[in-house]
Image (tube, rainbow, N blue to C red):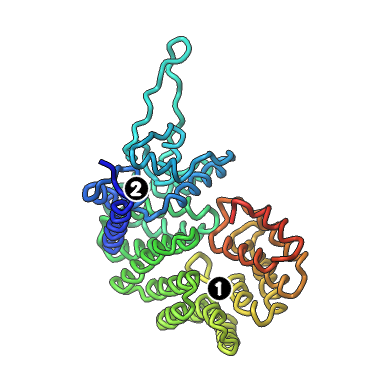
Amino acid sequence: MKVTRTTRAQIAREASRIRAARQRHGVPVPAIVAQISRDLPVAPLEAWRLAYGWSRPHVVEAVADLYRADGLAPPGLSTAMLCRWEHGHARPGPDYIHALARVYGVVPERLGVPLPTPVAGWYGRRIPQPRQEHHMPSEYPELSAVADSINLTGPGAGARDLAHQALVFYELRYSDYPPRALAAEVARCRSLLMGHHDTDTRRALGWMSALLGNLAHHTGDAAGALIHLGTAARVGEQVGDRWLTGWALGAQSMVALGQNRAADAVELADQAARFADTPVRRAQITAWCRLRGLAELGDTEGVRSASATARRHMDTAEEAPGRFGFDRAEFELHLAEATLGHDPAGAVAHASNSAGLKRAGSPGWAAATVVSARAQAAEGDKEEAVGLGVRVLETVPAAGLRETTKVRLRHLIADLDGHQGADELREAARDRV
C-alpha cells in the first residue's frame, strides 16, 4: 500500500514526539529506535534517523564528512537515494551500509539492511568485504577506546569509577575531534552507563548530556541541543549540582541566540547567572551568554556595562581549562563579537588577542579569525578580510568546521557582498558552509 506524503509527515511528527518524550527520561538512542520501530510503520534504517531527530540532508552531509575524514572524495549520495532505501524501494550497496552504520554509531546489522553475501572470486576464493568500523574512523582510536574500556569493565563500581574519568577526557579533548565524531562516542559511553543510579554517576551522565547538547549546537541541530541541555539542567537540579544547571542554561542561551531569539537568550543568561558562584563562572555567563544577546538587541550601553562587569570578574578569576571552563581566549572572542557592531577597531583587537591564544587550526582559532575578518571588513580593509576567511578554509578540515563558525563565515561573505574578493571567498567556501 502506498503511503501518502501526509501520512509520512504524521509519522515524522509522532517519531519526534516519541524521541522527545524518551530523551527527557534519559532513554538511549537504541531503545528509542526500538520503540519507533515497534509503534510506527517504518523500517529500521529510517527509525535510526528519526530517533536522532536528523533530516535526510543532515545524514547525507554526515556521510560526506566521513568520506572526507578518510581522505576520500564524497560519494554521490542524495536525499532521494536515502529516501528510496528507507522506504524499501532500493537497497544501498555495502559501502553505503557501512558508512550509514558509522554515522549512526551501530554495527551494520542493526540497520535492517542485509549486506550482500560474498561471492566467489578467482580460484574459488571469497571476495573480501569492506572492513566493518562499528563506531569510529580508525584515526581516532584513543577516542573510541574510552567507551570500549567502560564496556569491557561491565556493570558495577568499576564502571562508575570510570564515568568521571571519561567525562574529564571528553571535556579536555573536546576541540581535538570533529563534533559528530565526538558526539557518537559520548552518546555510546553515556548509554553504557545508563543503568547506574548512584548520584556520582548520574552527575557524570548529566554532564555528558550537556556535552551532547553543545555538540548538537556545533552541528546545527538546535532541537537536539535543547533536549540534551534541558536534560542536563534537570539532572543538575536532581543531584544538587548547581553549576551543571547553570552551565546548561547558559548553553541554552547560546542556542537561542543561534535561532535569532536574542531576548530569550538574555533571559536564559539571567537565569544562568543565579548559579554562577565563582569569579570565573560569573565572567563566563556574562561574556558567553549575556554580551552577544544584548548586542543583538542593539543595547550598546548594556554591552558596555556587561563588558566592564565581565572584565572585572575575569581579572580576579583563575582560568579553568576544558569545555565547561572559561579562559582568556574565549573571553576575548565574546568581547569581539559583542563590540563588532559599534566598535569594529576594538573587535579587531579582541579577536586578534583570542586567535593568538589558540593553536592555529583549532576551533577556537577558526572562530576568532573569522570574527577578526568581519571586523576588518567593517573597518574597510576587505582584502584582509578575504585573506583571513580563505586562510580558515584552507587550514581547518571540513569535518572539523563547526556549524557556529560556518554561520560566521556566511555572515562574512554577506559583509563582503559587492567586493571583488567576495567571489574568491565564496568559491573557497563552496560545499563547506
Q: Is 42 in front, or is 342? A: 42
Q: Is residue 152 above or below residue 10?
A: above
Residue 161 location, quadrant: bottom left
Label tally = 2
The percent coordinates of residue 39 (x first, y second) are 21, 50
Residue ID at (35%, 69%) = 230
The percent coordinates of residue 14 (x first, y second) are 27, 57
| Residue type at numbered disc 2 | Trp
Q: Is residue 351 above or below residue 1?
A: below
Quarter that holds the C terminus: bottom right
- Label 1 residue SS: loop
Residue ID at (53%, 39%) = 75
Q: Is 320 in front, or is 96? A: 96
Q: Is residue 93 left or right of residue 11?
A: right
Is residue 175 among the parts visible in the rendering?
yes
Residue ID at (28%, 72%) = 238
- Would you name the residue on which mark 2 appears? 48
- Would you name the residue on which mark 1 appears? 319
Q: Residues within 10 Å of mark 2 (few under 14, many from 20)?
A: many
Residue 27 location, quadrant: bottom left
Q: Rounded to the nearest whole Å, what is the CA distance between mark 1 and mark 2?
A: 40 Å
Q: Is residue 132 above or below residue 390?
A: above
Q: Residues within 10 Å of mark 1 (few under 14, many from 20)?
A: some
Residue ID at (65%, 60%) = 359
| Residue type at numbered disc 1 | Glu
Which of discs 1 and 2 lies nearer the camera? The answer is: 2
